[in-house]
Image (cartoon, grey):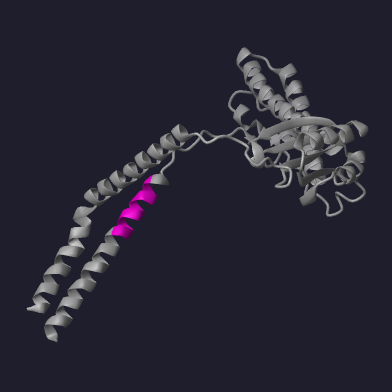
Amino acid sequence: MEEKKGSKKVVVFLVVLLGLLLVLGIGLVVAFSARTPRSDSVIYNESLGYGSPLSLGSKLSRSYDYDALSAAPSDMDQNYYEGEERSLTKTGEISVAVDDIDESLGEVRKIGKKYDAMVMNLDDLGKGVNRRVDVTIKVEQSRFELLYENLKELEGEFTTSSIAVSDVTERVLDLEARLKNYKSVEAQYLKILEKANTVEETLAVYKELNQVRLQIEMIETQLKNLATQTDYSYIRVRISQSSTGAEIVDQGWKPLGVLKASVRLLVSFMKLVGSLLIFLLVFSPVIAIVAVPVVILKKRAKK
């Protein structure tokens, strides 16, 4: 009994030792991955939405007024968005299984033309019973519901139909506020540029001015994209082949292709086995630390 208890204690000790080694290894990996190089200091504060002129402090005369540039915007009032026209984006999705995909696709085009809609994307995938056509239609938001209801009248078996509405009003207003701030900063830098006395000061201001104008262009692009999304809506129609309309034989049997696919699977399996063997070989010392003492203790216990 005492010999068995001693062997159990040794096994427990080895298991705890192995666990500590694993924890230590994981800790070293995490510590190493956390050591990422620090990036250079950013001149413009994206969260505040305006440029920081501090980088010009050592280059430009302190007689210039930086208050207008560095002043933080006041906190937004709780009723900031009240009374504003809501900016909404709408997307719809319809899935239907039909007997004749080509005929149904022509019907979708016909319905879309009725509402001045435009086919933005068309994907024809698969063959036979596995064939599927995905159509994305762009339509003015005012005609979205009418087009959506008309498309649901297609002959076939509807599997899913849904409408998603997203309110981007706050995002639009935030971008407009940031754009206003950046344009104010741009005007201030232009005034500073007029007072620059040396080439060094002029180049410093131009550097900051270009950064501000880059931010203005980025925000204007985002606003244009949001305007397009709110002025127009998108409906995705997925047309699949129903079992009733599918042909009995849709494609011939290709034994050579089956053979090649089987060989590829065999090669992949052999690679997997080889990787496992390499893994066991590399970690064999760790496994031996636990396995060898356990085997020895079991043999002694039997004796």
| Secondary structure mostly seen in the magenta stretch | helix
State the residue at coordinates (39%, 51%). Answer: 30
Q: Position of residue 303 (x, y in %)?
A: 6, 78
Give the extent of the magenta segment. 22-32
Q: Hey, which quadrant is residue 66 in on the image?
A: top right
Q: Nearer the viewer, residue 303 or 81?
A: 303
Q: Which residue is the extreme one toward the front?
A: 248
State the residue at coordinates (66%, 19%). Answer: 206
Q: Position of residue 243 (x, y in %)?
A: 70, 47
Q: Nearer the viewer, residue 16 or 130?
A: 130
Q: Is residue 270 visible?
A: yes
Q: Is residue 180 visible?
A: no
**Does the segment drawn in magenta span residue 168?**
no
Q: Nearer the viewer, residue 72 or 23?
A: 23
State the residue at coordinates (73%, 35%). Answer: 67
Q: Which residue is the extreme one toward the bottom?
A: 1
**Count of marks placed on residues:** 0
Image-based side of 69 in relation to 19, left or right: right
Q: Position of residue 58 (x, y in %)?
A: 58, 27
State the residue at coordinates (75%, 21%). Answer: 190
Q: Position of residue 252 (x, y in %)?
A: 56, 34
Image-based side of 36 in relation to 136, left or right: left
Q: Hey, which quadrant is residue 23 in on the image?
A: bottom left
Above or below 84: residue 102: above
